[in-house]
């Protein structure tokens, strides 16, 4: 950040009084510009014994498969974000269930939240951000083509839990990939 979004003056990167972290601070108007982690919210939507996946039409990870998910918008709940992202990416209607996974991704300042959900019908198709959308049984999941580690983790939790017939909430923290170290 170079300039204050409040008054347009150049900002300084320093620790404000009473804080412990460096922030972008405007010396003219005093505005402190906080930068906080982003929430990525999605749905693990089920139809019978299959899961809805979308093949990405955008970067990052163009052409790879993911659950419908994306950045939460202002003025919506996390459950509303999961339903909206599913509608945008898969043109699908869902009934949002319980929060299923919460995965911290501190090295990229994100938190990923995935809800279990139920597809309301089979009227779905690729949205603008998807190349294609399909339902997959566990044995047909393209594991080597899953776009993000958090999605792979959520899918593995799901199939393990389904075998056990027990649906606990999962929370994890994801370290940086070996190549990012």
Image (cartoon, rainbow, N blue to C red):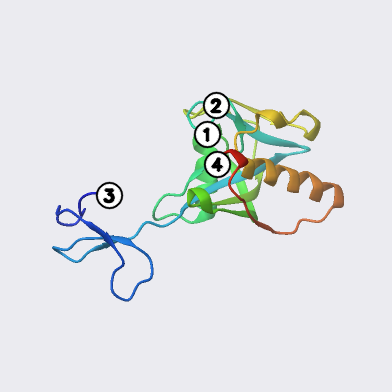
Residue 126: mark: 2
User: Circle 3: is it few (<14), some (14-19), or many (20+) Cα within 10 Å?
Assistant: few
Residue 1: mark: 3
Q: Which residue corresponds to the image point at 14% horizontal and 56% vertical from the top-left?
A: 7
Q: Which residue corresponds to the image point at 85% horizontal and 47% vertical from the top-left?
A: 163
Q: CA distance from mark 3 to mark 4?
A: 24 Å
Residue 89: mark: 1
Horizontally, is 129 left or right of 113 in the view? left
Foreground tag (4 vs 1): 4
Q: Which of marks 2 and 3 precedes in the sequence?
A: 3
Residue 180: mark: 4
Q: Which residue corresponds to the image point at 35% horizontal and 72% vertical from the top-left?
A: 19
* Discs 2, 1 touching: Cβ within 8 Å: yes
Quarter of the image where one finds residue 6: bottom left
Q: Which of marks 4 and 2 precedes in the sequence?
A: 2
Which of 61 and 80 lies nearest the eye of the viewer?
61
Residue extending farthest bottom: 18
User: Circle 1: is it few (<14), some (14-19), or many (20+) Cα within 10 Å?
Assistant: many
């Amino acid at each position: 950040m170079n300039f204050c979004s409040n008054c347009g003056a150049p900002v300084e990167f320093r620790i404000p009084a009473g804080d412990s972290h460096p922030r972008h601070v405007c010396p003219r108007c005093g505005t402190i510009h906080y930068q906080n982690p982003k929430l990525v919210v999605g749905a693990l939507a089920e139809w019978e014994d299959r899961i809805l996946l979308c093949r990405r039409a955008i970067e990052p990870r163009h052409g790879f498969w993911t659950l419908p998910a994306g950045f939460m918008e202002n003025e919506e709940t996390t459950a509303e974000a999961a339903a909206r992202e599913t509608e945008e990416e898969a043109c699908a209607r869902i009934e949002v269930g319980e929060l299923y996974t919460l995965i911290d991704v501190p090295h990229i300042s994100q938190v990923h939240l995935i809800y279990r959900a139920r597809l309301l019908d089979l009227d779905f198709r690729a949205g603008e951000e998807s190349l294609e959308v399909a339902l997959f049984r566990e044995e047909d999941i393209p594991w080597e083509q899953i776009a993000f580690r958090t999605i792979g983790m959520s899918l593995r939790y799901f199939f393990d839990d389904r075998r056990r017939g027990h649906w606990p909430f999962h929370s994890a923290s994801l370290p940086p990939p070996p190549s990012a170290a």
